[in-house]
Image: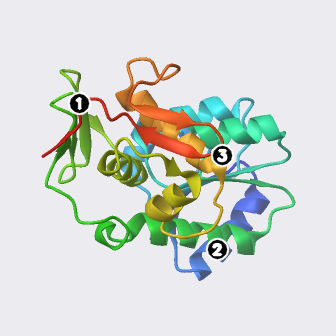
Amino acid sequence: MKVLLITDDPHEESILLSVLQMAGFSVTVGQRADIDEGFALESPAELIIVTASFDDPVDAIYHLRVYSEAPLLWVVDAVTERLHAQMIEAGSDHVFTRPLSVRLLVAYGQALLRRSQSPLSAILPIAPKELSMRSTVRLDPARRTVQVADRPLQRLSQLEYRLLHTLMLNRGQVIPTETIVEHVWGYSGEGDRSLVRGLINRLRAKIEINPENPHYIRTIARIGYMFSPDDAETW
């Protein structure tokens, strides 16, 4: 299991490197300046952990998400509720605050890897080879891509694919947030609404013409989400 650790504290790096390696991870260490496409391509990771300090962590997360879909854990000194939500919505899977529990960090990392690598068939029902909305929205499970009308193909992360797949299979039906957590992440319970909201926002950015006024993925207040039933057709 390959981990990319971005840190700017030599002492923290030494501790995390030792703990992660003892947990069975193969660790590549980078610094803030290394969050660019070239470094990521040279060192592909299955999990990314960031403990380095950034003036604008939200912008850093957006930049990282341009080239990596790996599960992402972020560590900060302190965070407001608003910033915490913004970081989740930008693409961080979990945000830790110091003092850091290394044990929890490793446990979260292992859990995210298990869920991201679990077979889709174990979580999602068997579906047709391709789902479409009368050629307006076309989801290709084999390549994990989505195309809206004649716009360019968009590659989906595994979580984004699971979410869109679930919504399209149940188009026209309101899906509670708890059900989304169960189908997309693979565990039951109330779930983290900000985590679901962040994934919804990332998916809307890929398929909606205007993500601020979505047509396909609709929010149903205090319940969950629904994929637009307009002209629905399954291939």
Q: Nearer the viewer, mark 1 or mark 3?
A: 1
Amino acid residing under circle 2: Ala
Whether label 3 touches label 2, CB < 8 Å: no
Residue at 32% of width from left, 35% of height from top? 229
Q: Secondary structure at mark 3?
A: helix
Please provide percent x and percent y for residue 114: 47, 72
Q: Is residue 129 left or right of residue 147?
A: left
Q: What amino acid is labelled 3 in the image?
A: Ser
Q: Residues within 10 Å of mark 3 (few under 14, many from 20)?
A: some
Classify 10 Å Cα crowding around label 1: few (below 14), some (14-19), many (20 and above).
few
> Is residue 36 in sight in this rendering?
no
Q: Mark 1 or mark 2: which comes first in sequence?
A: 2
Q: Which residue is mark 1?
A: 231
Say which mark, if any, is on residue 107.
2
Q: CA distance from mark 1 to mark 3?
A: 30 Å
Give the distance between the C-alpha atoms of the residues marked 3 and 2, in whole angstroms: 20 Å
The percent position of residue 15, horizontal first and vertical second, equals: 73, 69
Asked which quadrant contains residue 39, the reply is: top left
Q: Is residue 168 above or below residue 55?
A: below
Q: Residue at x 47, y 46 (%)?
A: 174
Q: Is residue 197 visible?
A: yes
Q: Percent position (x, y) of residue 144? A: 25, 48
Distance of label 1 from label 2 (alpha carbons)? 44 Å
Depicted 33 relative to depicted 214: above or below: below
Q: Return the x and y of residue 195 as percentages of the image width and height.
A: 61, 49
Above or below: residue 176 compared with residue 155: below
List the residue tagged with mark 3.
194
Amino acid at circle 1: Asp
Mark 2 secondary-structure assignment: helix
Q: Residue at the location (66% across, 39% down)?
A: 87
